[in-house]
Image: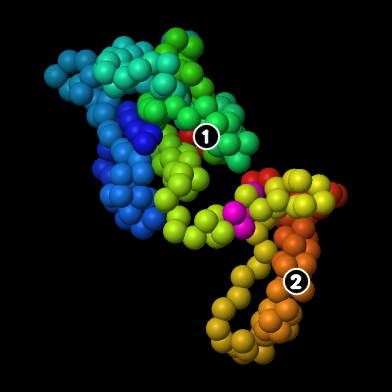
Amino acid sequence: MPTFHFITLFPETISVWFSTSIPGKAAKNGIFSVRTVQLRDFGKGAHRQVDDTAYGGGGGMVLTVEPLVKATEHALSDLDRKRTRVIAFTPGGKTLDRALLDRLHAESPEHFVLICGHYEGIDQRFLDGWVDEEISLGDFVVTGGELPAVAFVDAYVRQLPGTLRDREAFESESFQLVDPRTEEPLLEYPQYTRPAQYRGRNVPAVLLGGNHSAIHEWRLEQSRKRTRSKHGRAQDAGPNNA
């Protein structure tokens, strides 16, 4: 069972997500666990300061190295370092995608220590000396590292056995669905439910006919079209911060 240790200034934003819906049920069932470490507990002075102005000038504040190191070492103190990954969520990190998740699942760490950055950035000495890997949601900036960290854990635990009751539903999701012709990941096909007609918009007839072979072929072609359209690719496939 993997355990995710969030080092954060806002632990309440973590607990909300992992106490509800599918992740909440999976955590309750012991498929994974979440712990939070309040970074400010390791700050300096009466006000527990964790940030300071940047050397060389520039706007904004930077998370200082000492509180980050102390918080990380506190989280690591009773863990097997060889079975633990320390990950910081930064704009310059590797993009969170299926390949990255598959690699980490293959490595199967017992613990993840997740650094949730804030302000203008993180002192580079901490990233160089204490972090194993940096991850980003994409080429944009969000207010804090909690959002990409939660997205990472949510995506990771969906692949753990027992998180989803219907394994087929997981295997047909976007990026898990694979084109048998090219072995490339596809976006999921369009979904429809009752009623069959609504304000002049009809469910495609092939889905109503009961011919499962025809349905399979229709869905596969729709996935190919959707992937080409959303990712602007010439081939019939495609994949999907802070």
**Mark number for residue 105?**
1
Give the image location of residue 147, x and y in percent. Answer: 43, 41
Q: Is residue 25 left or right of residue 157?
A: left
Q: Quadrant of residue 49?
A: top left
Residue at the disc numbered 2 = 213
Residue 154 position (above or below residue 6): below
- Judge whether residue 236 is colored magenta: no
Q: Is residue 8 left or right of residue 82?
A: left
- Point out the tag, 2 or 1, that comes first from the N-terminus: 1
Q: Quadrant of residue 66?
A: top left
The N terminus sits in image quarter = top left
Colour mapping used in the image: rainbow
Q: Looking at this view, is 32 or 72 the one in front?
A: 32
Give the image location of residue 59, x and y in percent. Answer: 45, 24
Identify the residue shown where x is 25% and y is 29%: 38
Q: Count the marks: how many?
A: 2
Q: Is residue 54 visible?
A: no
Farthest-out residue, left: 46
Give the image location of residue 119, x and y in percent. Answer: 40, 29
Q: Tell me the amino acid under the disc marked 2.
A: Ser
User: Helix, strand or loop at disc 2?
Assistant: helix
Residue 172 position (above or below residue 212): above
Q: Is residue 32 left or right of residue 128?
A: left
Q: Looking at this view, is 167 or 221 the one in front?
A: 167
Give the image location of residue 114, x and y in percent. Answer: 39, 29
Residue 227 position (above or below residue 145): below
Identify the residue shown where x is 71% and y is 74%: 212
Q: Quadrant of residue 43?
A: top left
Identify the residue shown where x is 62% and y is 58%: 172
Q: Residues within 10 Å of mark 2 (few under 14, many from 20)?
A: few
Residue 236 position (above or below residue 6): below
Magenta stretch in the rendered image: 171-175
